[in-house]
Image: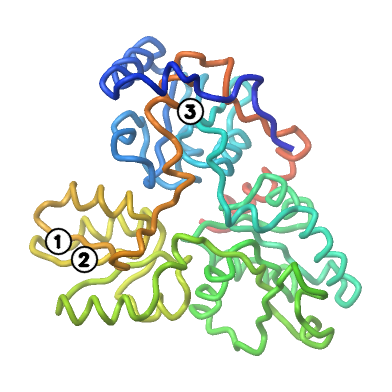
Amino acid sequence: MTTFAAKTLVSQEYKALPPEVLKAKIARKKSEWGKKLVILMHHYQRKEIVPFGDHLGDSFGLSQKAAAEVEARHIVFCGVHFMAESADILARPEQHVYLPNPYAGCPMADMAQIEDVFFAWDEISRLVPADEITPVSYMNSAAVLKAFCGKNGGIVCTSSNVTKAFNWALSQRPKIFFFPDENLGLNAARMLKYDPADIIVWDFKKERGGNTPEQIKKARLILWKGYCHVHTNFRPEHIEEMRTRHPGVKIVVHPECIPEVVEKADAFGSTNFIVNYVKEQPPGSVIAIGTELNLVSRLADEHPDKKILDLSGQTCPICVNMFRTTLADLAFTLDCLGEVNEIIVEEDIKKDALLALNRMLEFLK
């Protein structure tokens, strides 16, 4: 399991401080620690926090960068829980990882509780030998689920390499069990031209996941019923309305969106893909983006020569968990470094999770 250091909550004193004071505290601590401290900043963080990041990007890439920082001893991850776990899994023994707000979780990752996964695995194994199934976990998952995949000959993937992961998994065994994002799995299956008849969705709340024994035996791809509450905000009608209002608009979305949205978009890809897509469009472009609102807003600020719009209009696709991390959280964590908000993945889980991550690094280049 994962544990936190004893103190985990930001003090009321810090919450009451004005932003400029908090920013000065953060800057001072960054200066004091120098290269012994690295702050990782996910793309979806609040605008006022982003400038304090030493690295800005997607979760896995950030974890890799931190582990490669030779002098870094303290890694502060401004993101959500599974990201800090991944950083601790990849970190060197002398490095410590912190999550400034311990309540910053991921609802999609939480949809695949390990007890439910174990139960599903047992149910399926009564109908299909377990050695015919490769478990594949999306990076957006708990360390225990990554460890489950590692222990059972499986692999971890990102939204950028999910199709490669599926191909690798099928080269090992005839069936794939993919967690926890149904939509990412469906979009990968569409790119790989899967027959829909070979795909089933596993609803952990239902007996046999809501499937018949025959469907389970026949399925080549079993998708866990999970989703990102931000990306499922986007609907096909948003795209249609955007094209009507802005002829010539370019629409780019994340593959955690439902397949009907991905099919209608001009492009789709990971958060880094979206950032680069916007950069590459010529001045004067109108770009509608289907992803988290903090990133869309920041991209609009960074590219004043382009008109950048939120695809959904008024539905406000904000990741409230990413939004939890404040200047006060970061300042408090830095002032109490080594005493608060440390993420520690137990060694046995870390070992098995690392197996799955290393398979990704080895086979999905």
Residue 251 rendering spot, x and y as whole percentages = 27, 71
**Lower position in the chain sequence, tag 1 or tag 3:** 3
Instruction: Give the number of the mark in front: 1 or 3.
Output: 1
Disc 2 on helix, strand or loop?
strand
Image quadrant where residue 226 sits: bottom right
Residue 255 rendering spot, x and y as whole percentages = 45, 67
In front of the other: 189 or 21: 21
Left or right for 216, reference 178:
right
Which quadrant does the N terminus fall into? top right
Residue at which label 2 appears:
287
Could you tell me if the residues under marks 2 and 1 are in contact, i.e. CB atoms within 8 Å? Answer: yes
- Neighbours of disc 3 within 10 Å: few (<14), some (14-19), many (20+): many
Q: Residue at x 25, y 51 (%)?
A: 297
Q: Identify the residue at the far right of this view.
A: 126
In front of the other: 314 or 76: 314
Q: Amino acid at mark 1?
A: Lys
In front of the other: 218 or 202: 202
Q: Residue at x 73, y 74 (%)?
A: 175
Image quadrant where residue 222 sits: bottom right
